[in-house]
Amino acid sequence: MTKDWDQYKTEIEKLYITNGKSLDDVRRILKGKHGFDASIRGYRMKLEHWGMKKNKVPLSHRAQNRPRPKARTGNIDSASSGAHSSNNVSDLLESNNMPSSSHPESNATLWQGFNFPALNDTSLPTPSLHDSSNVPYMSLDREVGWSSEPDIFKTINEGLATDLLEQLSSGASVDIRDNFNDSPLHVAIRKGNIGMTDALLRYGADVDASGHRGRTPLHLSVASKNMLQLLLKYHPKISLQDDEGDSALHYFIRQYSWWEHTEHQVAIRSVLFAGANINIRNKAGDSPLHRIIDRDIPESVTYMEMVLEFLNCKPDVTTAMRNGQALLEVFLENTNILQKDRFRWNIPEWLSVGFRCLEQFLVVGANPNVTFHSQPFLHCCLESSSIVRKVTASRSFVLHLLEKADLDIPASNGDYPLHSVLNRSSSYWRSDSRFQYCQVTSTLIARQVDVNKPNRAGKTPLEVWLTSSRPQATLMKVTALLIEAGASSTITTTVGESLFDFLPRQPRECRIFLTRTLLKADIKAQQPGTNAAAASEWVEVWRSARQASLWGIAKTSLTKLDALDFRPKSKDFMECAFQIVAERLLERHRLQLNLFLRKKLDRESAAEDREEYCAILRDCRERKADIDVSFYHFLLDIMDI
């Protein structure tokens, strides 16, 4: 976009030629006053085009208008003493004590102490007529003088906005310092004067200037959201530290009850969004995240939401705090989020956000196997009453934890994670079972946990599960999951009984389902223990009955099983065993008879299957076995065989 230089030609000439301002000052003044922004090179080219030339004031003329330096005493008799400061050359040239250039030989000793080969070198580059140095330039007809700096600090302290603008447009420096090393910008921010702060920034004040105790303007803006938003427009370095190593984020979270004030929340989010280094530590070794976690965390939704904001910035949560504790461990201690028996019925709103924080800890790399209250973190979560279906965030967090945690680490009582889930006390819950037993168990099975691994007490997960009181639907679903995963159903339990002996307390429908499920399961090797031989005997008899290909052999095995003293004595055991064996053989014969109906089997073979099929149905009717009614319906299809 073409710049309208001619609009500012007169003002540029006044500032640069008449007032003797440097190009840097001219550029700064026009940018602050009119928003006209151009490079130094652009200014030089335009001045050349306009034919504006500023003449240097001769050194002799300048010397006449400034205090004469004190006469130097002592002999200059060596190169080292004569070259102590090249900046004093002009002073020496202006001093009346210098030797006359027309008689160099009379001062040979003095001149030998200086090495100025370039003084008479005509090949030196000619300085630009419009350079940006701070050497004073004046028009030849203007008297040279040294005016003092305007008291810009007094103007700011008194709140004189108009006077400040006049001083700035006249070229007052915005980089000077007061007795505390603060710049005008620091003072304006401390006064809370946004208008003056904006004016100083427009006139080129350094937004990153380090002032008293190393504090930058951003450090001082914590009290005002509007002041912060103004500073952010000038793209400050967000993570600069003061003399104590504190960044602006450290300052924001020092404010009293900062989480309760919307302005503070907006300010912190703005700094985070601007790219603040969330891992920066002060001299005490604390990062901003350490500061907000290493305290008694209030049970506040807004506080938890701010913790989540920090965690979403992917902080370093793997490095221990200065006391050696892990950040996740400190967070757990200071929130009591996993405290047992605390949230039985009333679920506070902050709890849900707290679990989102826990999940985000895992996402950014926190150790999932950290110890909390002498327990592995996973076991603490699985036993906590806070982990309920009603809190969706808690379920999501637990599933995430199960994906990352080491599942072979036992709890202090010797339980493995699957035991902890299945042994979770149900006394807290109503019949709706607000804990997701099925989902958590499925997740553990998907991670290939050993479903037959005993705990320290020798109990398998299935024994733990069946000895607890559970809602019927949940009890049946989880049992089926464990059986499908390969859980042994015919083991001898730690009390010397079978798993079937734990079922009589259940309602009949549930009891029948569980008995059939356990009987259909694959027979696993028996664990050694009391009455192991006797237990193995009934298992072997049951296996022979289930695997028999003829109904007569199967009935004999079932009769033998019924007579054994050490078989399971539960009320429905033999009824279910008879039904399972009968249905298995009925299904086998039905498949063969269907082949005959499709003309893929000869009549003689089909007749044998029909006879066996009918014999099984007769025995089932006599025993009043509750088999699938479809087997009776199929009998009508085979009447003509």
Image (cartoon, rainbow, N blue to C red):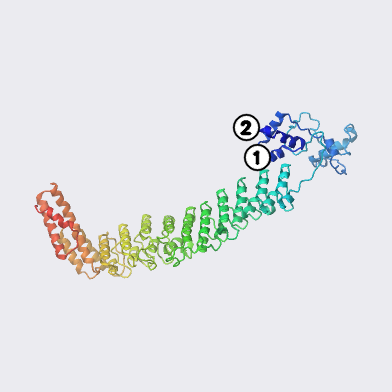
Residue name at image x 42 percent, y 66 percent: 345
Residue type at mark 2: give it.
Thr
Residue 383 in the image: x percent, y percent? Answer: 42, 64
The mark found on residue 2 in the picture is 2
Q: Above or below — where is 502 with respect to 484?
A: below
- Taking the image as drawn, is residue 206 in sight? no
Residue visible at 89% across and 34% down in the picture = 100
Which residue sits at x=30%, y=59%? Answer: 480
Query: Relative to residue 570, is residue 111 depicted above or below?
Result: above
Q: Quadrant of the N terminus?
A: top right
Q: Quadrant of residue 4?
A: top right
Q: Are marks 2 and 1 in contact (CB under 8 Å)?
A: no
Residue 513, how many percent across, how many down?
Answer: 26, 62
State left or right for residue 247 relative to residue 382. Answer: right
Location of residue 104 in the rendering, given as x and y in whole percent from the top left corner: 88, 33
User: Residue 35, labelled with which disc?
Assistant: 1
- Hey, what amino acid is under mark 1? Gly
SS at circle 2: loop
Q: Residues within 10 Å of mark 2 (few under 14, many from 20)?
A: few
9 vs 509, left or right, is: right
Q: Residues within 10 Å of mark 1 (few under 14, many from 20)?
A: few
**Of residues 361 and 201, the one drawn nearer to the viewer in this rendering:** 201
The outermost residue toward the front is 162
